[in-house]
Image: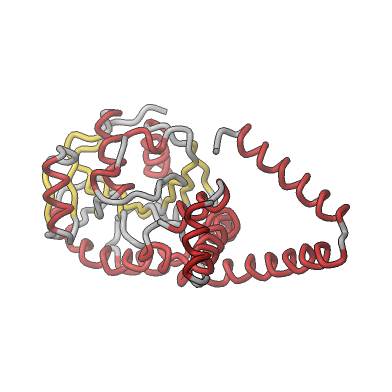
């Protein structure tokens, strides 16, 4: 499906995802005008200096005349930000977000929106450990999945237009319920980040000479953990607090699996270990085959 360019796109939060969206939309010709709203003066100045947007500032009135608004802020801030934007949102405007939790965003944002706003929550499964306006690049979303969880009142035409926009910048779009999204992401994204933060934290609690050796002899696995643990702490604080039920469920399952592995190691059960590792290696190969690694 081809998509007509949006007249005015407002990106709220011009960090990695926001700046990448600005570049990707510009590259694909999806917007006549791109505007950024950000409360950090340095981000505003940098976005303008880099030519990411046509205008930028911290005034919610920048939403006036926008036909697409994308919230690129931590999940916990979405409701408050939407409330500030609400007086300036015209009927028919599409409002979406990029947060890693969807039920909480629906809970916080939907009640504050004026009638006629097309609220279509979204989540591009893409990113790096870097942040800020200069971290963005137009190719970030190419070949990566983007999940949309439209509310029941969303106009199918608006949903199709937003889906087409994501596809135009290279994303593979799937539509599902907010509840299903949160359970899936709890195991594929949220739990791995929690584990990474924990392991890196454990390493910092070792004796000083051990800390230095951990850094000096870091193998690929530990380096991957440190990369994940370098992600935005505010964003991930909000993710865990707003998807706590699903995360705790998956954490419980992990605890049970770790118990089984601990027992296998303790009693020398090599067959169980090999079976487990063979199975998980097959999953890794499947991820590579799907071009998601």
In the rendering, at what x and y percent does residue 30 appear? 27, 33
Q: Quadrant of the N terminus?
A: top left
In the displayed structure, does residue 3 sit left or right of residue 153? left
- The answer to whether residue 287 is above or below residue 77 is above
In the displayed structure, does residue 4 sit left or right of residue 289? left
Please give the name of the residue rendered at 56% of the width and 58% of the height, measured from the top-left corner.
192
Please give the name of the residue rendered at 60% of the width and 71% of the height, measured from the top-left corner.
248
Is residue 106 something one can see in this rendering?
A: no
Q: Quadrant of the C terminus?
A: top right
Is residue 163 something one can see in this rendering?
A: yes
Q: Nearer the viewer, residue 262 or 164?
A: 262
Rendering quarter of residue 160: top left
Total tally of numbered discs in the picture: 0
Please give the name of the residue rendered at 54% of the width and 53% of the height, measured from the top-left corner.
222
In the rendering, at what x and y percent does residue 6 appear? 25, 37
Please give the name of the residue rendered at 77% of the width and 66% of the height, measured from the top-left corner.
262
In the rendering, at what x and y percent does residue 10 appear? 22, 48
Kindly give the residue lying farthest to the front in the view shown: 209
Q: Nearer the viewer, residue 4 or 208?
A: 208
In the displayed structure, does residue 33 sit left or right of residue 185? left
């Amino acid at each position: 499906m081809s998509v007509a360019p949006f007249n005015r796109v407002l990106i709220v939060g011009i960090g990695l995802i926001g700046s990448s969206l600005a570049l990707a939309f510009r590259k694909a010709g999806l917007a006549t005008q791109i505007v950024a709203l950000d409360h950090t003066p340095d981000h505003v100045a940098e976005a303008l200096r880099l030519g990411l947007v046509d205008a930028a500032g911290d005034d919610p009135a920048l939403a006036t005349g926008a036909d697409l608004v994308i919230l690129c802020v931590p999940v916990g801030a979405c409701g408050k930000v939407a409330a500030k934007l609400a007086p300036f949102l015209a009927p028919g405007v599409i409002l979406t977000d990029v947060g890693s939790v969807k039920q909480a965003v629906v809970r916080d944002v939907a009640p504050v929106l004026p009638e006629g706003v097309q609220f279509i929550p979204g989540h591009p499964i893409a990113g790096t450990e870097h942040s800020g306006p200069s971290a963005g690049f137009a190719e970030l979303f190419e070949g990566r999945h983007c999940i949309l969880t439209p509310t029941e009142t969303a106009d199918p035409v608006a949903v199709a237009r937003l889906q087409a926009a994501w596809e135009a910048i290279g994303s593979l779009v799937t539509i599902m319920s907010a509840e299903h999204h949160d359970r899936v992401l709890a195991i594929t994204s949220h739990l791995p980040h929690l584990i990474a933060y924990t392991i890196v934290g454990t390493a910092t609690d070792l004796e000083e000479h051990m800390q230095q050796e951990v850094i000096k002899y870091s193998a690929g696995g530990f380096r991957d953990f440190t990369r994940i643990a370098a992600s935005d702490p505010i964003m991930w604080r909000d993710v865990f607090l707003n998807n706590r039920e699903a995360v705790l469920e998956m954490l419980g399952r992990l605890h049970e699996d770790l118990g089984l592995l601990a027992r296998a190691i303790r009693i020398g059960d090599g067959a169980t270990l090999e079976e487990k590792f063979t199975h998980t290696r097959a999953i890794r190969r499947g991820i590579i085959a799907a071009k998601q690694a």
